[in-house]
Amino acid sequence: MNEMQPTRRWAMGAALCLMLSHGALGANTVPVDAAPLEQDLAQQLTAVQTHGLPIAEFYQLRGGKPAWQAGEAVESLVAALNSLETDGLAPDEYHADTLLDQFQRSQTAGTAARAAFDIQATQSLLLALDHLERGKVNPRDVEPEWETPRPESRYSLLRVVHAVENRELNDAFALVRPGSAAYQQLRDALKHHYQLANLGSAPYLASREASLRPGDEADDVAVLRQRLSLWGEADLLVADSSAYPLIGVETAANRRSFDAPLEAAVKRFQRRHLLQEDGVVGEQTRLALNTSVNTRIDQLRVNLERARWISPMQADEPRVWVDIAGYRMHYVRPNGQHWDARVVVGSARRETPIIHSTISHLTINPSWTIPPTIMREDVLPQVRADSGYLARKNIQVISPSGEPLVAEDIDWQRPGSLMLRQVAGATNPLGRVVVRFPNDDMIYLHDTPARGLFQRPQRALSSGCVRVEGVTELAQMLLQDTGSRYQMSSLLKRGSDQNIRLTQRIPIALHYLTAWPNAQGEVEFRPDIYRRDAKLLAAL
């Protein structure tokens, strides 16, 4: 191809600018010799900072040819990058807001500029794919307990190249986007909340001395209807009597009446926010109702990132995972059956850590060696205040080597080096069964005699370990699913501290998720009990 005359090249560049200004980029751009462009591309690739992205491999699969020298190609890339908003990622982080302008300038600035733009566009694509597959933030930067290395990328780069050639960049993103139903439900919820943000807000529910209750008639009830309608409760707003004069005062009265449909809507809202499902609008329910749409958008973005982190682990079967902020435990059995249970987790003062491990064994009728922190902060003050506390709780005093000591001989103001062990029995906090897995924090799943705590909607009440409702049933399933012949009914009749090893280990993960779909497919918004969301949001 012969080189163009300068006047013709300027005219075509001006025409391209005009097309760009009207958003009508064609498939063909300024024609230049392919060889010089490919030479510049090859030369620049030797010096480019890849940051671990397979940029050189991308061009190798294309035979060294550029990928982004046609307007339609750049437009398809920008459109795909903009779609990342519903994944909680910021399109501008990948230059979605500037790529078209950069493309326009590069086309009239010579082959070196065109090659530089091509590499930048490829880098934007590959960085977006990496963040969508593995998460933008390294979990270790915001979660100090996170020990599992980030997984390697597993997508087919060749399929990405084909998607680029076919102008089907959404297909490339679909290759790496987590495929779980939970992830898609979070995306749908985020898209819905972006729509809510564009619609405007509703008035806020004012603080009250008395809770709003079913049967009440007040102006605040009309505001309550508007807040619930904002959050997706349909058919709660009745017609405005000023717009429909013939309706008269009955419509206004209906708006002020806390009737049965409104009570049912309040209960649904409370269920989705882990509040007491009583239909009464107290202070906690009021604060949840008054939360801004933008706050919920941020919460969804944070948890979409966490969903990307845990996506590889969620694919394992069988597996046990604890949803810490959701107060639930889930067991996916080898046959695909799901078993769920309510749990009690660590309080804000003694957080349950994020853990990735494997269940190794069970302890039946366990005794409990009281951890140092609990002994120092909880037990010793009780002993000092009540000399009969240890005997009443069946707690033994032992030396570090395991020899029994006499409690009456101990100076409990300065007890020195000793251990306290509560024998197996009805008052033992571990109950009848402990499910154990290696970890540095001495965390495990266990039974509890305080079963009434499972009835509470918010259950951050323990000292860090996880109490599981129905843990005996879980233990029997673990035995059965790993080929053991033991029966829990027989084991429970035997002595204390029986350690029963599983013939194969079951993966277990403890994760912290403040927005996640429940069994009904509704996205729950949970309290950020450990105050972790803000740090991750800032990193995003």
Image (cartoon, rainbow, N blue to C red):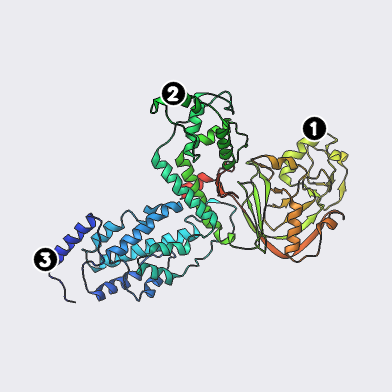
Q: Estimate how packed mark 2 is, as few (under 14), some (14 to 19) or many (20 or more) residues with alpha carbons within 10 Å.
A: few
Split into 4 quadrants, where in the image is the N terminus? bottom left
Q: Residue 199 sits in which quadrant?
A: top left
Tag 3: residue type?
Thr
Tag 1: residue type?
Ala
Judging by the rendered image, the residue that carries numbered circle 3 is 7
Q: Nearer the viewer, mark 2 or mark 3?
A: 2
Mark 2 secondary-structure assignment = loop
> Would you place residue 244 above or below residue 333 in this image?
above
Judging by the rendered image, the residue that carries numbered circle 2 is 248
Q: Nearer the viewer, residue 139 or 450?
A: 450
Tag 2: residue type?
Gly
Q: Nearer the viewer, mark 2 or mark 1?
A: 2
Q: Residue at x 23, y 66 (%)?
A: 29
Q: How far, Cα to Cα, is label 3 from label 1?
A: 97 Å
Q: Position of residue 245 (x, y in %)?
A: 39, 25
Residue 429 located left or right of residue 339: right
> Would you place residue 427 above or below residue 178 in this image?
above
Mark 1 secondary-structure assignment = helix
Disc sitting over residue 385 in the figure:
1
User: Mark 3 or 1 closer to N-term?
Assistant: 3
Q: Position of residue 282 (x, y in %)?
A: 58, 30
